[in-house]
Amino acid sequence: METPATLTTRPENPKTQTSYVRIRLATQSDVPHIHKLIHQMAVFEGLTHLFATTESSLSSTLFKSPPFTALTVFILEVSLSPFPPTQPDPTLSQFTPVETRVILNSPIVDEDYETFRVVGEECLDAVVAGHVFFFPNYPSFLSKPGFYVEDLFVREPYRRRGFGKMLLSAVAEQAVKMGFARVDWMVLGWNVNAIKFYEEMGAEVLEGWRPCRLGGDALQAYANK
């Protein structure tokens, strides 16, 4: 599959070219990059005052259950050269990493290339460009499970290039493969670009629903009642 996109991972390489994209399951070794992605998302959303995540807290809470039975993370990687062949994991028969080639039409400068470079891959120029957090929920009116997307984030140099759509499509594909009913998520009201993107892909932006949250001292007080 070829997807129109624009990408170059190094400022010193301004030429248009073909790049390669892989969406795979995150592992413990991805925690440093995941931590940095979450912080960048907090900056983007203007919520750094709520950011309390550490690499240690991520390591102690992620990857405790098999993928798709609890919180699952997909990592989006981009490279200027093909990724090495993926060795199939017999314990993960429900999922195969998504790999595609993107046709470049103009360069992107990634100033954080070294920070997000993938270490230890035969594909030496691979870089982490985004991720998606999701977990199973249960729409009771349908009496079938679904997925709820907690976070979907693509780093600034890679936005508006189709990479967010690739991540969400990977979640949707997994939901269909597992016979799930739907995929749900929330979007910030001021993020008109995201709202337009979701509507164009066929998602229904629900009016009349308001998110509710009980946390911190309020959670403790209510629990004590």
Image (cartoon, helix red, strand yellow):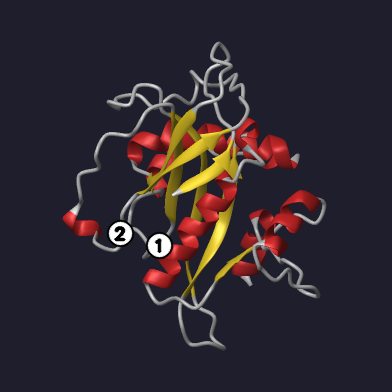
Residue 33, compared with residue 143, is above or below; it is above
Q: Amino acid at mark 2?
A: Pro
Residue at 20%, 50% in the rendered image: 88
Q: Percent from the top left, x then y, of residue 91?
A: 20, 58
Which residue is denoted by mark 1 in the rendering? Answer: 70
Asked whether residue 135 is in view, the answer is no
Marks 2 and 1 close (CB-CB < 8 Å): yes
Q: Callout 1: few (<14), some (14-19), or many (20+) C-alpha neighbours within 10 Å?
A: some
Look at the numbered disc 1 and give the secondary structure of its residue: loop
Residue at 70%, 71% in the rendered image: 204
Query: Residue 150 sits in which quadrant?
Result: bottom right
Q: Percent from the top left, x then y, of residue 184?
A: 59, 68
Q: What residue occupies the far top of the structure in this picture?
A: 12
Q: Which mark is residue 66?
A: 2
Residue 28, compared with residue 92, is above or below; it is above
Residue 186, compared with residue 56, is above or below; it is below
